[in-house]
Amino acid sequence: MDFTLDEEQEALRDAVRGLLKGYDPSVDAERRRQVTAEDPGYDESLWGRLAEMGLLGLPFAEADGGMGAGPIEVAIVCEEIGRVLAPEPYVASVVLAGGLVAELGTDEQRSDILGALASGESVLAYAEGETAEPVIQGARADMIVWDVDGEVFVGPRPGGARGYRTYDGGRAARLELDRSAVTPLGKGGDASEVVALVTARARIAACHEALGAMDTALRMTTSYLTTRKQFGVTLNRFQALTFRAADLYTALELTRSMVTWATLVAAESGDPDEIRTASARAALQTARAGRLIGQEAIQLHGGIGMTAEYAVGHYTSRLTAINHWLCDPREQVGVLSAALTDHTVLDPLA
Amino acid sequence: MRLRLNDEETAFREEMRTFFTTEVPQEIRDGIAAGRHIGKDEYVETMRILNAAGLAVPNWPVEWGGRDWTPLQRHIWHEEMQLASVPPPLAFNANMVGPVIANFGSQELKERFLPPTANLDIWWAQGFSEPNAGSDLASLTTRATRDGDDWIVNGQKTWTTLGQHADWIFCLVRTDPSAERKQAGISFLLFPMNSPGVTLRPIELIDGGHEVNEVFFDDVRVPGDLLVGEVNQGWSYAKFLLGNERVGVAPVGATKRSLAQLKHHADELGRLEDPFVAARFVELENELLALELTALRVVAHSADGKPHPASSVLKLKGTELQQAVSELAVDLAGPLSLASGSSSVPEWAALATPTYLNLRKASIYGGSNEIQRQIIAGTILGL
């Protein structure tokens, strides 16, 4: 049992961190505001640099234009993205939509679609249902991967899709499936098991994005407590505030443990059910901690935390988005309730 | 990064599991599993079985019965013991006075005390807290004054857990009242509970049980060679001891076992069909898993046996979850829980509320949870 990154993984983390450094809204909130004010809501040039670093093809086979990396490497990238609240649709486009193509696509589909995704030429979106909403980056994506009750299709973005801004600075759209314009991904038919597995991997990746965001939100908060003065002293002189920060740290560390564990399950387990359950556990923990840390980060800042000019509230907003997109706690509690009598005690090392 | 135990670790776990479930008498384990208070004899019998197998004091130096285990092995030993409902080695002996004597005591003290301490031939009591020295332990006022080679002890200790069984007590006493810092001027003394001038008075707790005591010292004469280490250095030994206390203070395995038993009772009653009840089990199992994984992370990164600062997280969250499971038991038992004196309702329902009340202590002892928050805020977050 070992929860530490190896040298190559550390190098990857440092490289991604270096690339995203200039985008950190806890240092300069204005840049992200500008980027998210204009369509498509993220920085296309940064997307291009993510492609150059090989990150957009990270989890895909080398034969398909990817890097052949696993869940741990994806987790590292997502955590760094979350840390600076990068609005680039990495989890939605690469891990989820791309993941479905990688698992289900024919040789030709994988080569074409993933090749274009990895090189940054083409953005993918994932749409659930014949009428899908909200489809993240649905109005910008070049190709849409459709999941219609477990049957998966792929096709170009339908014409006339109208996008809108989501509260977290992202973009989404409502899309209508035109069956004449799509082709089955791979051999077609029911692929709900694969969809569940890929969604679980994307859920774990989203947990890492949230983890990075929570980490920054707490760091900003503790930094604020040691600099902001009221009543002639810095706020860290008030135990009512520092104790709450201690609770946030506790929530963050528990979440880090759980999310890291889920990633290792995804990396090591050959059993899709195990990965699904682990993703539900990580998501439930992430959702609970994300809500707590998001709320308290604003409260401990006071009024400044409410303003769009200051970054911490954006972290809360993004954490809320992740919590209800892939990590929705009601859904996870449902999944885990159904499995409650499968075990006497949970054994994370078994 | 790697999740699974390697073959050696898996074999070790199997060995522990087999030992605990076959070598410790079933009646004793049943008592612990049912949540009953067990008596002195059961503690002594178990600790001697463990000691004979080299499993009572693995954290001690090897020459005194310790095992040269990795932190992970020690974690596995502790978890498997709890999962098997084995009463743990008496903390006052195994985690407190033993390591202090082994690390700071003279060769003579080690030879005299360590073997009987490991074997629970001596039952130790902890003489730390006083009526006016709780979280602020260093303000203790029990005094020891010189009389020739001896010390004369006067004062009072309180919250002395299971002191009614104790043969000896280890005490923090003030030996230099004029020291500038209150932490200086404290020494670490050992003496028999049956010394003239020692009086023990039980404190009844809200669950009706007798677990803790007050101990009064009236001119208790203690030979000078029963002072551990150096005079006036007792505070550093106490800090060392409290650091050990905090490690393993998150009873993950025991809480998992309690929750599993409760789940079994709820299932038998058909209560898991109620989504509200099921959701509470789900949330608690999940939080316990996150805690266990955090404990494993701390174990993996604790160097040279020193407690990781994150061990405060384990104490804080571990006791909260322990209490939360006891709360769920009360809620599941509902009105039946009022029948705590009855022998006709299921035992778990009768014990639910006394246990819940008893466990309010968990967030107070071992460094109250407020002290843990203070440590996290100060040491880790720099606030």
Image (spheres, coloured by chain):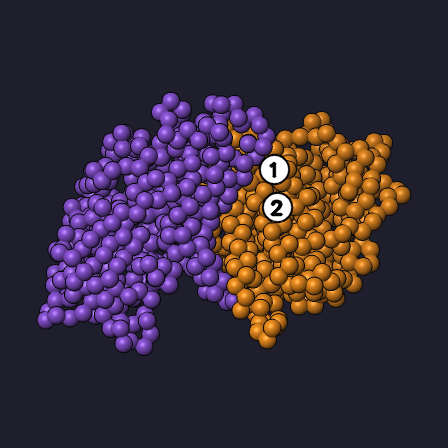
Amino acid type assigned to the residue bearing label 2 in the image: Ala
Same chain for labels 2 and 1? Say yes or no.
Answer: yes
Residue A200 in the image, given as x and y percentages of width and height: 61, 39
Q: Do residues under tags 2 and 1 come within 8 Å of each other at their CB atoms?
A: yes
Which residue is labeled 1 in the image? Answer: A332
Q: How crowded is mark 2: few (under 14 residues within 10 Å), some or many (20 or more)?
A: many
* Vertical placement of residue A337 versus B358, above or below: above
Picture coordinates of residue B74, whole percent (x, y)? 32, 47
Chain that appears purple = B
Rendered colour, chain A: orange
Q: How many marks on residues?
A: 2
Quarter occupied by residue B47: top left
Instruction: Judge left or right: residue B294 versus residue A175.
Output: left
Image coordinates of residue A143 in percent, x first then y, are: 78, 43
At a point 16% along the width and 57% down the height, the residue shown is B197
* Element class at badge 2: helix
User: In the rendered structure, which amino acid carries the disc numbered 1?
Assistant: Gln
User: Is any atom of residue B196 visible in this view?
Assistant: yes
Gap between marks 2 and 1 measured at Cα: 10 Å
Q: Mark 2 points at which residue?
A: A287
Which residue is more in the foreground, A108 or A268? A268
Label located before the other in sequence (2 or 1): 2
Q: Can residue B80 be seen in this view?
A: no
Q: Which of A235 and A21 is in front in this view?
A: A235
Q: Which residue is drawn at 12% across and 70% down?
A: B147
Element under disc 1: helix
The structure residue drawn at horizontal position 33% and vertical position 66%, both measured from the top left corner, is B138
